[in-house]
């Protein structure tokens, strides 16, 4: 978020915090309220975005190697934090378990053979803003920790391009990480709740 936006955001947060006990109930904590008031920060698109990938329930379309992982997350309205963005369209792309993108190019789905497009896909959020898709734990590639790219669009909202990082231990823990839960099969990656801003 730019410096220009910081002060108004803080003022909005204070205003919102004053309303929390009456409007949302005491179960909403300070941190949650703070997160809810902030649109999710954008992050670099990176060099390998492919537009118009098909809707999938598994990003691993052609059996690439790696540890299976289920991604679950949510898309909410940054201006009204208890309001889901039903039907939000999320494009995800990431490496396979060996740290490779497929393809290692930028472009449009229609310009490739279908089987060249892997570890990518489009997912649609349900009426509660929730999305779920199978994938693999992405391998880090130097110097970056494991991460997943997201491009999120919804009618009436500003598009959000961002990345999210997966926690692999204390020596590799940037901000905005999530720890993958491995005591279930497949492993669960609780993706962040994304807050997107109305136009
Ligand atoms: Fe990347």
Image (cartoon, rainbow, N blue to C red):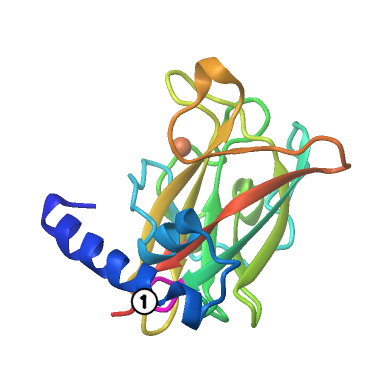
Which range is magenta?
A: 77-81
The majority secondary structure of the magenta stretch comes to: loop
Pointer 1 residue:
79
From the viewer's perspective, is residue 93 above or below residue 18? above
The answer to whether 160 is drawn above or below residue 80 in the figure is: above
Which is nearer the eye, 149 or 75?
75
Magenta stretch containing residue 26, yes or no? no
Q: Is residue 129 above or below residue 45?
A: below
Q: Is residue 44 left or right of residue 72?
A: left
Q: Is residue 198 left or right of residue 25?
A: left
Q: Which residue lies furthest to the top in this view?
A: 171
Q: What element carries label 1?
A: loop
Residue at 60%, 58% in the rendered image = 121
Left or right: 98 with respect to 141? right
Find residue 88 and report its horizontal and vertical position in percent: 52, 75
Q: How crowded is mark 1: few (under 14 residues within 10 Å), some or many (20 or more)?
A: some
Residue drawn where x is 52% and y is 60% of the image: 29
Q: Position of residue 93 (x, y in %)?
A: 54, 48
Q: Which residue corresponds to the image point at 37% horizontal and 62% vertical from the top-left?
A: 160
The answer to whether the residue bearing label 1 lies less than 8 angstroms from the nearest atom of ligand 1 is: no
Is 78 within the magenta? yes
Please state, as top left, top right, bottom left or bottom right, where the C terminus lies in the image.
Answer: bottom left
Residue 69: image quadrant is: top right
Residue 191, x across and y down, in percent? 60, 51
How far from the left and from the top, in percent, is residue 33? 45, 63
């Amino acid at each position: 978020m730019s410096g220009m936006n910081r002060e108004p955001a803080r003022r909005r947060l204070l205003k919102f915090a004053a309303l929390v006990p009456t409007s949302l109930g005491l179960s909403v904590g300070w941190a949650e309220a703070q997160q809810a008031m902030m649109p999710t920060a954008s992050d670099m698109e990176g060099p390998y975005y492919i537009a118009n990938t098909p809707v999938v329930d598994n990003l691993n379309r052609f059996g690439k190697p790696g540890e299976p992982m289920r991604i679950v997350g949510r898309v909410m309205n940054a201006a009204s934090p208890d309001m889901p963005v039903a039907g939000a369209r999320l494009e995800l792309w990431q490496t396979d378990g060996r740290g490779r993108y497929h393809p290692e190019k930028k472009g449009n789905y229609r310009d490739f053979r279908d089987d060249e497009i892997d570890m990518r896909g489009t997912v649609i959020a349900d009426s509660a803003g929730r999305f779920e898709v199978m994938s693999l734990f992405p391998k880090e590639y130097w110097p970056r920790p494991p991460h997943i790219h997201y491009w999120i669009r919804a009618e009436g909202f500003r598009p959000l391009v961002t990345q999210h990082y997966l926690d692999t231990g204390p020596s590799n823990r940037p901000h905005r990480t999530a720890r993958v839960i491995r005591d279930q099969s497949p492993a669960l990656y609780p993706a962040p709740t994304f807050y997107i801003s109305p136009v």
